[in-house]
Image (spheres, grey):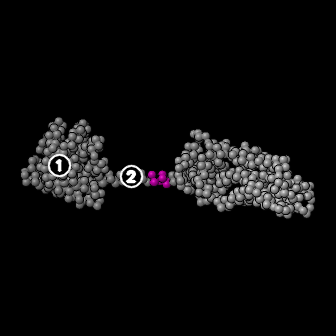
Amino acid sequence: MIYFYGLCFLLSTLLLIWFISFNEQHCLKHMFIVLFTTISSGGYFAFILSTNLNEALLANKIFYVGGAYLPMAIFFITCEVSHVKVYKWISILACVIQTVIYGLVFTTGFTEIYYKSVDFAIINGVPTLIKVYGPLHFLYNISLYGYLIGSIVVALVNAKKKEVNLHNVYRMVGSALLSGIIYFTQKALKLQYDLMPLVFVIEVVLIYMPIIKSHVFSIAENASNQFKSFGTDGFIEFDVLFKYMEADEYIINIFPELKNQRANKRLKVDDSLFFQTVYPLMLENKDNKSTGLLGTRVFSKDNKHYEARVVSVRYQGIKIGYLIQVQDVTDKENNLHSVERYNEDLKRVVELRTSEVYEIRDKTLLAFAQMVESRDLSTGGHIKRTAAVVKVFTEQLIADDYGLSKYFLYNVVRGAAMHDIGKISVDDKVLRKQGKYTDEEYNEMKKHSAAGAEIIEKVLKGIEKDDFVRTVSNIAHYHHEKVDGSGYPCGLTGENIPVEARIMALADVFDALVSKRCYKEAFSFDKAFLIIEESKGTHFDDKLTEEFMKCRPVLETLYSDTNFSEV
């Protein structure tokens, strides 16, 4: 028996050390349970080592700590697990009564109110107290069985509550029944040795599990520990296996589907708001090993906006569940949406104003080019028509995914009107001549290409983007080059000619062919496209010519419009 009581004392001492060392959130009730168990186990161990009446009586007074206070502590923990509020005055009164009962033990040897007589004997090597109970000893039995029966009744009656964890209730009821049955059995059988030390240790293990879970998964506790800085509104908790633990009234009002959910049970997934918004947020973070905040999500209900935040709940460094905070962020979201709407409106205004600026700029460039063209009596309307042809041509290149960016081709279309800007530097006698040029006059006319590039660089540099200036300059400078090297002003060949200039060359020649000039009549579309096709590889780029030929139906329709052809 020495080893039995010694083992019980050792186990209870280890539980006490573990509780003090590793439990970060101490609670007085919880501490008393473990402490009373250790003291009582120590008393039983001291009793088995006693050799006389005085030692045995002292040991009896020590282990009576458990008998007097543990049933009361178990009752209070049962109320806590069963979500039953115990008023402070009831707790104080209960402590006073149990202290009085415990005090009666100390009257042994002085009065006969608790024990009429006590004798010490060693029977079969086991110390034994032969006791004759006094008139007030019944108070101990009443308190013992009163608390045990009270614990069972409280647990069973409140088990119907949805927020009550049935597993914890079963543990509490089992603990109370175990204590009562063993105490009654050993009294009825008049066993020489006492099994209560082992019962106390078992009770601590049985009770402490629900204590830990109810304490860790306490909304009030977690609200203060996890979200001190968040200004929270409501909470809901799940364990690591996604079993529903608890939710406050604020959450229930938002998600009424949780109202009838049983604690410590996995929820049945449906199409309600909770399973569409908050529940997936928790599942998405099940493998997230981070501590603290794991993820957030904003959702709406009844014209209100809420933000859900999921936090990892840890106990002694081990992840044991999730705490989800739900906060009303309606004002914040409305302000955000107002800012977003303002930004969208501002963006539209900026885009409109930018578009207007671009339109004014392009019209200014076109007017400048037309002013230059007005000096040339042989090419009226050429600028507008070639710009339109280039637009049709670039749209075909985009449709066929030719490999040139839309932004680049947009610049080519804008720059097309500037291709003959250099003619402003040509002498009026040459520019306004009707009829064919002499060789000397033709050489003078050819200077407009290089002059155009120089004018564009000087006029547009610093006003337009560099890539646009470069594109327009290349168009003006090289649109008379030919891929076989026979063009002017530089005699460039093949791909050495910028692609924008090769595009412009096709549009420029096509309009010259199908338009009436002072020195020729307009060619038919058949003849014009035949000339262009025959010039492939000499004057024009092979691939670009093939693409240009695809534009024939659109160009014929365009030039068939009297208003367009007479521009």
Determine which residue is flagged by label 2: 351
Q: Nearer the viewer, residue 198 or 96?
A: 198
Secondary element type, mark 2: helix
* Amino acid under disc 1: Gly
Using the rendered view, name the quadrant where residue 126 is placed: bottom right
- Residue type of the residue flagged with mark 2: Glu
Is 547 above or below relative to 116?
above
**Residue at screen point 60% across, 51% down:** 321
Residue 443: percent from left, percent from top:
10, 54
Of helix, strand and loop, which one carries label 1?
helix
Tell me the residue that label 1 is attached to: 494
- The first of marks 2 and 1 along the sequence is 2
State which mark lies toward you, 2 or 1: 1
Instruction: Give the residue drawn at x 66%, y 45%.
Output: 263
Residue 355 location, x and y as percent? 35, 51
Q: Nearer the viewer, residue 18 or 126?
A: 126
SS majority, magenta: helix
Q: Indicate the quadrant containing the N terminus: top left, top right, bottom left or bottom right.
A: bottom right
Q: Which residues are magenta?
A: 338-345
Left or right of 2: which side holds 442? left
